[in-house]
Image (cartoon, coloured by chain):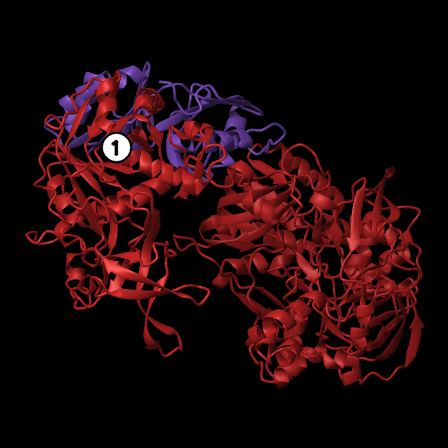
Chain colours: A purple, B red
Amino acid sequence: MSNIARDGARAEGEVLVEGQGPQGMISLRCDLGAAALKTALAGEGLALPAPLSLTREGARAVLWMSPDELMLLCPYDEAPALCARLSEALSGTHALVAVVSDARAAFRLTGEEALLRETLAKLTPADMRPEAMPEGCVRRTRLAQVAAAIWFEAGAAHVLAFRSGADYVFGALAYAGRSGARVGHL
Amino acid sequence: MSTRLAQGGRLIDRAKTLRFTFNGRQMKGYAGDTLAAALLAGDQMLVGRSFKYHRPRGILASGAEEPNALVGLGTGDRFEPNQRATVTELFEGLSAGSQNHWPSLEYDIGAINTKLARFLPAGFYYKTFMQPRAFWKHVYEPFIRRSAGLGKAPAAEARDPDDYEHYYAHVDLLVIGGGVAGLQAARIAGQAGRSVLLIEQGPVWGGRAPVDGGEIEGLPAEEWVDRTLEELTAMPNVRLRARTLGAGLYDHGYAIAQERVSDHAPGAQGPRHRLWRIRAERIVTATGAIERPLSFAGNDLPGVMLASAVRDYLVNYAVSPGDRTVVVTNNDDAYRTALALLDAGLSLPAIIDARPAGGGALMAEAEARGIRVLKGKGIAKATGGARITAVEVCAQAGEGACEETITCDALAMSGGWSPVVHLWSHVGGKLNWDESENFFRPDPQRGPVNHDGNAHVAVAGAANGHLGLSEILEDAGSAAARLFGSAVPEAPEASPRDEAPMAPVWLMPQGAKQALRAKAWLDFQNDVKVTDVQLAAQEGFTSVEHTKRYTTLGMATDQGKLSNINGLAVLSQALGEGIPQVGTTTFRPPYTPISLASIAGEAKGALFQPVRKTALHGWHEAHGATWEPVGHWRRPYAYPRPGESVEDAVNREVTAVREGLGLLDASTLGKILVKGPDAGRFMDMLYTNMMSSLKPGACRYGLMCSENGFLSDDGVVARLDEETFLCHTTTGGAERIHAHMEEWLQTEWWDWQVWVLNLTEQYTQIGVVGPKSRAVLEKLGGTDVSAEALPFMRWCDGEIGGLPVRIFRISFSGELSFELATPAHHGRELWDKLVAAGEEFGVTPYGTEAMHVLRAEKGFIMIGEETDGTVIPQDLGLNWAISKKKTDYIGKRAQARSFMDNPDRWQLVGLETLDGGVLPDGAYAVAPGKNDNGQVNTQGRVTSSYHSPTLGRGIAMALVHNGPERMGEVLEFAMTDGRRVPAKITGTVFFDPEGEKQNV
């Protein structure tokens, strides 16, 4: 894996923006009310998240993406096997499970919480107020000109974006979080 | 002369002197000054020349409405034209220059225009520059552009060095305007626990109240403002932001505001401007009111100012506009200016009040202090040159006979007030004409409503037509209550308005003759006078919108803030209609100009546009790729070697593929997974050919059409298993086709059991192409890619060189060819291994142009080259890919329409030039005769054209009328230089027609 987009990239300003290493990701499309889905997730020790949120179990998490789509996070190397097991568990159900670990780039923003929120609010029209975007709330939105998913967890802001736009997203995040550009609103 | 007074000035800090220059002249001001205040303090009343007549113009106002004091600010990369001196905060080292003068501000040659004014009437440009038409572009336009226009554009090579950004804010209540009304509305909503954002365009809170005086809750207005600010600052749910202009309101509580973060401190860290994009549940606009000028002859002379501006300069900046100031008014408010002048110890020869009975309590106070008040009088004309020297007093009811001349060096005028209704109007709020106050005010019954039918914008205070402190505070409370449906709070006690009614004075004197009217300015910035509007009415421009465009009234950068109502009134009188019947022109955002850079925000330089990069982008870059933008992707066009032309590189790459081994980064091609029990049925509807019959392990080329039958995309489909298909799309089509699939599934076939997923970015896909392609894969090893194990149009999963791959045996070049898909994180490793292993086979990475040539030699079509949204597959000879058995597919019914199901169309053929040259892409084949527009008839068009290094000559494809029936016929193609180039119609497959090379 010599080519993870923006792996190890760092930009320090009002907040610290870091490109992340490999992240296992699995897209799962299914009727989220299907009993088999609940069972399949439970078999992996995972729980179905409520809309606009995530559930986590150690290094694995389930992100709600849309009324019929989930994204599973897991260690990169585990993704193919987890994907295969979930496919198997859902074999009698109309579902699509696919590894998408390589399709996206992951970023993490750390720093003072209000600054993290303001940095993102320079790029996304989604409401970044703590009451609208609490810890564990997942939003699919845009960052400046490209699509992204964002959430806050354990004091950090997390961003997933398509890998082809990784340079752009990193640049936009670094710009938004640059020194001297505090808004002082949130 | 205008000067700084020894004492006073509530906004300036005399301990901090700031140096600046105006037209190169060294000047000084104080911290807290605006540029306009500092200019006046240095007796620089003359600040520019007017747009059309180059008349000398001075500072007229003290705020955003200023039409005259526009300056070019800064130099070089930071030069910015048309900046209003009245809202520019002074800073150390500021450099400003006046505009629209030549050769100098004081001696301007263009001022001759004023002598020729009668030759430059309304509609002058329309009347003069109509004929001959041939002169429009090269004679008239350059002439008009040179003589008109205000500021100069920055130098072409200048690059703005500053930062800009956007900020998205979400609040319960946005309050626009930090005067008394805005403060009170924010305070009430803040006390109710709402999240509130209060913005103020200037650096100072409190609006006019600290200058105009009065008491609130037992405190002088200024102290009340300070106390309320403290109260608001202490509320955790309220945010205050100064220097932030509410620029525009839109539907659903969306508002745009521009924060001038560091205009007053250039070069400071952080953004210069920040564009606020605000979603507010509710909005209060408390934007105040703007004073109107009076229309009398010579009202544009430097030294003639709005009465409120004179007061502002005195009280805020301790600047007197002149030693002897006359006040002329039609209302009581201007008496406050008179009293302020007296307080400052300045000479005030007279107040000229157009009302026969004069004013009320304020007039009584003025008279009691010994000021001479001339009632029922007007100004026949103001006289002077670069500055006013005197006014001729006349009866307002008369025609302008001079009764008395009063010398003066400043004149404070007030024609009444106009509420700033712009923001309310932006979002659809309607206005009523107030007969007693003579202004338009918001009609709360016809306001903007939200998605739920509830009003989401309310106007408060002077902007809502309330001009007394007590009334303003009460209105601010009720505005917040109106919006949130809460009880109206008790208004704080404050000074009520105690003024005599104003009198509408649209022309001074009422019966002013032509000579006077022709010098009575309505629009100072665009040089529109009373006579211009009257002429427009006389010439039949009865609609206010037409009059605006004909006369240019209100069309300058100030957008008619001062001229609008006066112009409307003159027009309505000329038309003999009431002002509300004539109506207003449309108010559009932004309220005042905002910088384009703030609109661009972060989108400049590397962030101008997201460039999509494949996992191999870095390798391409390191190996000298020239780029072709495809959608937002950058794909290598070719890899020229040092000293090699791009054209030569393409030829070398094509030959290497045909003779040895080429590598293509095909990662950008769309890869969409389609899965479910109904996937086969869905695929049959998406593609024109039969896909449900495809066996797992096999590939098939397919076409997709829009519901109108036009060819939309193409690509190879691989069936992964009984329920799963992988659809390859074009590079530019991936997102579009994915959306197309989702749309049909979500809106039409919602009951079909199909999921789709866009996997485009998951894989790096590498084309391994050429006679040696199998050899290199065998050398790296891991999967049997023999003709028997992996025949043409099959795929398999496996490993190559120890990396996981899916191998597709497909060909877009006519050569033996494999496409290897590997998870993108491994992409670079696989590419590197192929390059290293391929060395002995002459491995040659090739770009999109070589790919195009290779496919064209084989007659393969390209979406976007052979198609343009009007081409159906049948036009391209692709009937073989259209199923006759299927009852339906998207586009089938459209293709059965008479003009589609018809051989009489332009259809695809190959072309060979007779001289072996290359036809220009897009060239038309001419046909005999001309059409109704006198244009040469055409019978075909080149869709693709290349030099084929394989064949050593030019090859082309074209859509030609009945083309396939006309093999061997020679057509003539029109060149842009008039030449005609002959080319012979051929088949579309130029190379290896039997397909022997790919099938080995």
Q: Report if residue B11 is visible in the image.
A: no
Q: Is residue B158 above or below residue A116?
A: below
Q: Is residue B796 left or right of residue B129?
A: left
The residue wearing badge 1 is B770
Tag 1, which chain? B
Q: Secondary structure at mark 1?
A: loop
Viewer-nearest residue: B282 or B840: B840
Kind of residue at disc 1 = Gly
Q: Position of residue B170 (x, y in %)?
A: 49, 40
| Residue projecting furthest to the front | B915
Q: Is residue B156 left or right of residue B335?
A: left
Q: Is residue B372 above or below residue B285?
A: below
Q: Is residue B312 left or right of residue B959?
A: right
Say which quadrant the C terminus of chain B sits in: top left
Q: Position of residue B207 (x, y in %)?
A: 70, 50
Name the residue: 58% across, 81% down. B541
Q: Report if residue A92 is visible in the image.
A: yes
Q: Position of residue B683 (x, y in %)?
A: 15, 43
Viewer-nearest residue: B4 or B267: B267
Q: Is residue B779 above or below residue B221?
A: above
